[in-house]
Amino acid sequence: MIEIKTGNVPCCVYVSEVAGHMHFKSNILNSIKKHGCYGIYKGEKDLGQSIFNTDWHLSNAFYNKNSEYTSIINNIIGEHTEALTHFLRYVDPISCENIWFQQYKRNDFHGWHRHERSVFSNVYYVDLPDNASKTSFRFLGKEFSIEVKEGQILTFPSFIEHCSKPNPSDKIKTVISFNYN
């Protein structure tokens, strides 16, 4: 079920629950662990981040070569896409692009940024320790956050600046992000 978050939120942001999350969580984390640590690409555009492990810079190499991971993620994203398409009353299906994972150790962060060339951005909170940072937003001069918990997907317009502030937890935070067009 998709829920619109309002209150102090100056734009439409959606949250949904991933059915069977605890089963998926262990399979996703084991799959990522099995295939090793890719680290973070420290290119010119990526100076505003410190991320322990991601496959963003690998052109979906991890996603394409890991069939177990791919199957799990495709099911989760497929259900979310169908629910969001129905909720928004879109006639044509939403297409999903650019799927990647990110893992944050203590003090890791991802600076303020936008996802250009997409309509919606999504964050699936696979492993969210109790005091770990969540996604923060800046829009029309306001900074805000959305209350989310592990096992939920947060969907928001891609033009909104967002970040992951430093992770204060000693436990690793794992998210899977993806964009819709």
Image (spheres, grey):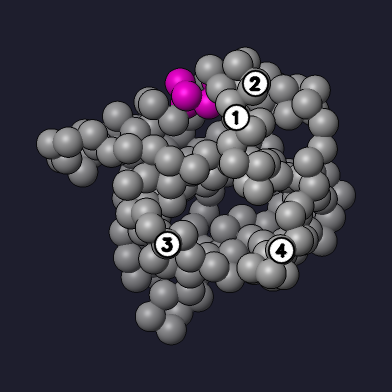
Q: Do the residues labelled 2 and 1 touch (CB within 8 Å)?
A: yes
Answer with left or right where residue 85 lies relative to residue 97.
Answer: left
In the image, which disc is placed on residue 66? 2
Residue 175, can we see it?
no
Whole-Å distance between the Cαs marked 3 and 4?
Answer: 18 Å
Residue nearer the viewer, 117 or 18: 117
The amino acid type, in three-letter code, at marker 2 is Asn
Whole-Å distance between the Cαs marked 2 and 1?
Answer: 6 Å
Whole-Å distance between the Cαs marked 4 and 2?
Answer: 25 Å
Residue 120 image point, x, y percent: 37, 52
The amino acid type, in three-letter code, at marker 3 is Glu
Q: Are marks 3 and 4 in contact (CB under 8 Å)?
A: no
Whichever of callouts 3 and 4 sits on the residue coming sooner in the sequence is 4
Dominant secondary structure (helix, strand or loop) of the stretch shown in magenta: helix
Q: Name the residue under label 1.
A: 63
Q: Mark 3 points at which residue?
A: 116
Residue 157 image point, x, y percent: 36, 58
Q: Mark 4 points at which residue?
A: 43
Residue 65, can we see it?
yes
The amino acid type, in three-letter code, at marker 1 is Tyr
Mark in the foreground, 3 or 4? 4
In the image, which disc is placed on residue 11? none
